[in-house]
C-alpha cells in the first residue's frame, strides 16, 4: 500500500511508471499532512509490517530489506533508519 499525498504530478507520473503493478495505492487530491496519509495507509494495510517514508528520503540500496530482516527477530517490535542530512 502506498499513499500519494498530492505529490508533484510529473514526479508522481514518473515514479508510478516504475512501480511494481502489484502495489496498490491511494492518490490524494490534496495534501492532508504526513500523519493523516500514514493513517490512510495503515487502515488499508495488507501486510504484517508498516513502513512510513516521506517523499524527500533517499534510500540506500537494500535498506528496506535489512529492516525486514531485523523484524524477523521476535524480540524486535520497531526499527527505523539512521537519518543523514546532506548539504547540497
Image (spheres, grey):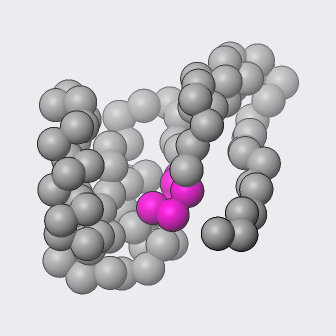
- Residue 44 in sight: no
Instruction: State whether the magenta stretch is mostly helix, strand or loop.
Output: loop
Q: Where residue 50 sits in the image (x, y, percent)?
A: 52, 42
Q: Where residue 8 sits in the image (x, y, percent)?
A: 25, 72
- Quadrant for residue 36, please give it: bottom left
Q: Which residues are magenta?
A: 52-57
Image quadrant where one finds the N terminus = top left
Q: Where residue 72 sits in the image (x, y, percent)?
A: 68, 17
- Whether residue 76 is in magenta: the answer is no
- Residue 83 in sight: yes
- Quadrant for residue 41, please give it: bottom left
The reply, left or right, for residue 87 in relation to residue 1 is: right
Image quadrant where one finds the C terminus = bottom right
Against 44, residue 71 (above or below) is above
Residue at 55% from the left image edge and 56% from the top image edge: 57
Residue at 25% from the left image edge and 62% from the top image edge: 11
Query: Who is closer to the viewer here, 80 or 49?
Result: 80
Instruction: Give the total number of marks visible in the rendering.
Output: 0
Against 63, residue 40 (above or below) is below
Residue at 23% from the left image edge and 59% from the top image edge: 12
Toward the front, the furthest residue is: 88
Against 37, residue 29 (above or below) is below
Residue at 72% from the left image edge and 45% from the top image edge: 80
- Quadrant for residue 18, please give it: top left
Q: Where residue 5 sits in the image (x, y, percent)?
A: 32, 70
Toward the right, the furthest residue is: 75
The reply, left or right, for residue 62 in relation to residue 47 is: right
The reply, left or right, for residue 39 in relation to residue 2 is: right
Against 34, residue 4 (above or below) is above
Amino acid at each position: 500500500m502506498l499513499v500519494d499525498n498530492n505529490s508533484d504530478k510529473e514526479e508522481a507520473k514518473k515514479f508510478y511508471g516504475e512501480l511494481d503493478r502489484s502495489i496498490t495505492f491511494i492518490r490524494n487530491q490534496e495534501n492532508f499532512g504526513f500523519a493523516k496519509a500514514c493513517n490512510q495507509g495503515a487502515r488499508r494495510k495488507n501486510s504484517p509490517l508498516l513502513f512510513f517514508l516521506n517523499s524527500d528520503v533517499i534510500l540506500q540500496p537494500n535498506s528496506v530489506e535489512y529492516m525486514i530482516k531485523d523484524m524477523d527477530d521476535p524480540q524486535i517490535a520497531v526499527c527505523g533508519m539512521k537519518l543523514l542530512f546532506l548539504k547540497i
